[in-house]
């Protein structure tokens, strides 16, 4: 059940980024119409060329303010998700990226102070449902901004489409 991934700590290696990471850095426009397998090879390569090659499933992106700023590109959170990123924790998010990530089922958590909690390569423990972030190396922990219940439900379902399918099925509707 997907709820477990939000109620239990997500533990992953930290990839640290700064402020104002734009959707163009996350999903470069030159690859906008390329297949997903090609697009994911270019996620954040302009700021961390090794990222798309070395990120592993379960890793955690930690960033500064205004993560995902820029144009509305659903491909920005989609690329992170396709690479296996477990969640993104940032000081703050651009609203459109935040909503696109939740809609796709990629856990995101606003957490003021998080950019000073980790060094690149540290392990992070993130309990999305409790908005709690911890650095096991230092023992330091922060309380993030809890997500609205409806967003938690969407993330638990694996995205808005899966949530709508479940809602429709529960009411006897067509699942397709």
Image: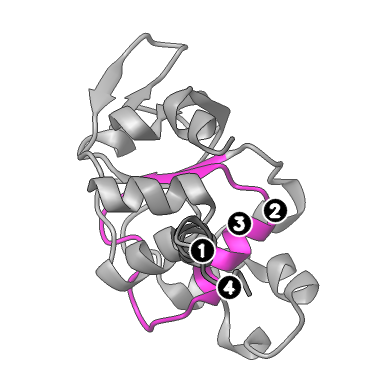
- State the mark number for residue 50: 2
Q: Which residue is mark 3?
A: 81
Looking at the image, do the residues carrying marks 4 and 1 touch, with CB atoms under 8 Å apart? no
Q: Which residue is mark 1?
A: 172
SS assignment at label 2: loop
Q: Which residue is mark 4?
A: 174
Q: Is residue 89 above or below residue 131?
A: below
Label 2 vs label 1, nearer the camera = 1
Looking at the image, do the residues carrying marks 3 and 1 touch, with CB atoms under 8 Å apart? no
Sequence-wise, the earlier of marks 4 and 2 is 2
Q: Residues within 10 Å of mark 1 (few under 14, many from 20)?
A: few
**Which residues, given as a range, are shown in magenta?**
60-89
Inspect the magenta stretch and tell me whether residue 76 lies in it. Answer: yes
Looking at the image, do the residues carrying marks 3 and 2 touch, with CB atoms under 8 Å apart? no
- How many discs mark residues in the rendered view? 4
Alpha-carbon distance for marks 3 and 1? 31 Å
Q: Is residue 141 above or below residue 36?
A: above
Alpha-carbon distance for marks 2 and 1? 47 Å
The image shows residue 67 at horizontal and vertical percentages of: 34, 60
SS assignment at label 4: loop
Tell me which residue sits at (56%, 75%) in the image: 75
Sequence-wise, the earlier of marks 3 and 1 is 3
Label 3 vs label 4, nearer the camera = 4
Sequence-wise, the earlier of marks 3 and 4 is 3
Alpha-carbon distance for marks 4 and 2? 44 Å
The image shows residue 131 at horizontal and vertical percentages of: 29, 32
């Amino acid at each position: 059940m997907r709820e477990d991934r939000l109620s239990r700590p997500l533990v992953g290696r930290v990839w640290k980024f700064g402020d104002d990471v734009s959707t163009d850095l996350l999903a470069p426009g030159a690859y906008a119409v390329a297949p997903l397998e090609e697009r994911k090879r270019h996620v954040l390569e302009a700021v961390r060329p090794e990222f798309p090659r070395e990120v592993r499933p379960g890793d955690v992106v930690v960033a500064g303010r205004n993560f995902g700023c820029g144009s509305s590109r659903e491909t920005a959170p989609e690329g992170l998700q396709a690479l296996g990123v477990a969640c993104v924790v940032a000081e703050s998010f651009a609203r459109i990226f935040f909503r696109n990530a939740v809609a796709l089922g990629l856990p995101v958590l606003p957490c003021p102070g998080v950019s000073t909690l980790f060094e690149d390569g540290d392990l992070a423990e993130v309990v999305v449902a409790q908005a709690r972030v911890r650095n096991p190396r230092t023992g330091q922990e922060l309380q993030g901004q809890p997500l609205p219940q409806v967003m938690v439900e969407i993330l638990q379902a694996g995205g808005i489409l899966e949530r709508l399918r479940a809602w429709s099925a529960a009411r006897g509707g067509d699942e397709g």
